[in-house]
Amino acid sequence: MASPRFDFVIIGAGIVGLAAAREALTRFPRARLLVVDKEDRVAAHQSGRNSGVIHSGIYYRPGSIKAATCVSGRAALLDFCREEGIPHCICGKVIVATSAMETSRLEDLRRRGAANGVPGLAIIDMARLRDLEPHAGGVAALHVPGAGITDFGAVARRFAAIVQERDGIVRTGARVIGLRPGSGGMAVETTGGAFDAARVINCAGLHCDRIARLAGATIDLDIVPFRGEYLSVAGGGRELVRGLLYPVPDEALPFLGVHFTRRIGGELELGPNAVPAFSREGYRRRDIDAGDLIALARSPGSWRLLRRHWRMALGEAFRSASRAATARAARRLLPELRSADLRPAPAGVRAQAVGRDGTLIDDFRFAVTERAIHVLNVPSPAATASIAVARRIIDMAEQL
């Protein structure tokens, strides 16, 4: 019996995969489209386990895919949230320098953001910082008025609903177990059935490298999972931050550092850190997957990464084990923070692409094989940029 045939099969029902499905059906309203995901719901991993921050585009190298898609994607995301009634707030962000050395890096960030077309950036003194965030410490700050917050899980669920309203199919509980050339496309084998696809789009997030190799792609990277652990701020500490309070990031790493985030529901969270996880879905310290651990051990990039950044890894592990240590580090930004006000909050896992030479791949990365697009590295700001990233993906898919 012939397998059902689709014009597009998208692997992964996270925010990027669902945005790509929506974009495909916008361009090709008559297309037969299927989204498959191994979980029992959409946005089960990175898309539903993140800080909810709408990024403005200041961190990314001018000319990079991240820079281009973040700035345009932010505008498209805000339009979408307004049209669909999804809660969001442009609360602004301050990036705080706590030393004279960090102050010079604020100007570098301001120039980079201006080059990317981010409006309204200004370096402010302590008097202005105290107007915006009365309890913040530091010596100066970069004000980013266009940063905001939303619920990216809600955005992803609305994308999924729109796909279904346009006669696309979103099938959960269908893990991909095989990909091979088929008649005029690819044969996609899943635990929920087999399908023929004229085009396959791999948006499998934490498992995207494995799906790419399953399709016969030769890629020079591995996904290394980093668990981002959050703490919620309770009691009187909850009122110490109005919006988004960030440190000056380390330019050598694609992580933004532990920061304070006001969530769309009013909660205040501290985090995330960046601790290597021993499972690609390791949301708890005790979560260990033997297959994932073996894959990490066999990855030359993982060992080279550890050798290069072992001091950072030890520091992150220490703060992961000690709430008091996390509070001490955070008090550089917020001197009045009390350890007693911190509570555990749900963690996330970042799918970080690492090159075979141990380099943390900073920009978004895509690969093309016959009849397939592979989305191999779309960490933050992918949620903010999802609509713009989806346009880029479907542009590439049209050329298959």
Image (cartoon, helix red, strand yellow):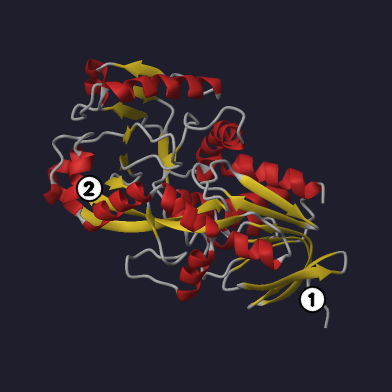
**Which callout, 1 or 2, points at the residue further toward the start of the chain?**
1
Residue under label 2: 326
Task: Give the residue type that dot 2 points to.
Answer: Thr
Whether residue 6 is situated above or below residue 236 in the rendered picture:
below
In the rendered image, the quadrant that contains the N terminus is bottom right
| Residue 335 x/y as whole percent | 15, 34
Whether residue 75 is situated above or below residue 275 in the rendered picture:
above
| Residue 129 x/y as whole percent | 26, 22
Residue under label 1: 3
C-alpha gap between disc 1 and disc 2: 53 Å
Whether residue 274 is situated above or below residue 139 in the rendered picture:
below
Q: Is residue 173 left or right of residue 247?
A: right
Kindly identify the residue that appears in the image at 70 percent across and 57 percent down.
Answer: 201
| Residue 379 x/y as whole percent | 51, 47
Kindly identify the residue that appears in the image at 64 percent across and 56 percent down.
Answer: 163
Asked whether residue 273 appears in the rendered view, the answer is no
| Residue 2 x/y as whole percent | 83, 78
Whether residue 367 is situated above or below residue 115 in the rendered picture:
below
Alpha-carbon neighbours of circle 1 within 10 Å: few (<14), some, or many (≥20)? few
